[in-house]
Image (cartoon, helix red, strand yellow):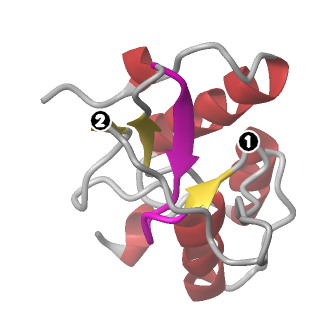
């Protein structure tokens, strides 16, 4: 990951719809917690997005909490990833577009699967 490959703040905001800080390091922190890293598939075949910290998030990048205000515990059967450590969204336009598409799909139809957007194994 080279700092010379960083996607500009303006371009990243345009793609994600998020208001982002100017600082590259702060933007990376936002991406780590607000953008989906993958999706958990539950026993009933429904899906829950998770961030780079493996915490469940909704289609707006906000944490999914239980009734006590703690991160929701998810019992999943499988999981799919949208990128790997070598292709972080702030460095890779294709990955940034992919995770943004995941969020758009889930906003438009939470029941729609996003597994087809997972990175190839």
**Which quadrant of the view contains residue 18?**
bottom right
Residue 82 is a magenta residue: no
Question: Residue 76, how many percent across, how many down?
Answer: 37, 42
Q: In which quarter of the image is the C terminus?
A: top left
Question: Residue 25, how many percent across, how many down?
Answer: 56, 86
**Residue for point 53% across, 30% down:** 47
Q: Nearer the viewer, residue 120 or 70?
A: 70
How much space separates mark 1 and mark 2, taking CA atoms?
21 Å
Q: In this view, does 20 lie above or below 79?
A: below
Q: Give the range drawn in magenta.
A: 45-55
Side of 117 where 59 appears, left or right:
right
**Residue for point 60% across, 30% down:** 102
The disc label shown at residue 59, or none: 1
Q: Nearer the viewer, residue 46 or 53?
A: 46
Question: Residue 7, how many percent across, how many down?
Answer: 56, 58
Q: Residues within 10 Å of mark 2 (few under 14, many from 20)?
A: few
Question: Residue 55, how many percent across, how many down?
Answer: 52, 65
Is label 1 or label 2 in front?
A: 2
Residue 51 is a magenta residue: yes
Q: In this view, does 24 lie above or below 7?
A: below
The disc label shown at residue 77, or none: 2
Q: Residues within 10 Å of mark 1 (few under 14, many from 20)?
A: many
**Residue for point 72% across, 48% down:** 58
**Residue for point 44% across, 65% down:** 52
Q: Quadrant of the N terminus?
A: bottom left
Q: Which of 46 and 30 is in front in this view?
A: 46
Side of 54 where 15 appears, left or right:
right
Mark 2 secondary-structure assignment = loop
Furthest residue to the left?
121
Q: Which one is earlier in the sequence, the residue at label 1 or at label 2?
A: 1
Mark 1 secondary-structure assignment = loop
Q: Main secondary structure of the magenta part?
A: loop
């Amino acid at each position: 990951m080279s700092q010379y490959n960083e996607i500009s703040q303006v371009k990243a905001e345009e793609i994600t719809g998020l208001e982002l800080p100017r600082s590259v390091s702060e933007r990376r922190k936002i991406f780590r917690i607000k953008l989906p890293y993958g999706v958990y598939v539950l026993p009933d075949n429904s899906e829950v997005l998770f961030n780079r910290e493996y915490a469940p998030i909704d289609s707006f990048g906000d944490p999914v909490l239980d009734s006590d205000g703690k991160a929701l515990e998810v019992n999943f059967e499988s999981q799919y990833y949208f990128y790997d450590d070598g292709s972080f969204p702030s460095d890779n336009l294709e990955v940034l577009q992919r995770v943004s598409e995941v969020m758009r799909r889930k906003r438009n139809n939470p029941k729609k699967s996003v597994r087809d957007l997972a990175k190839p194994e």
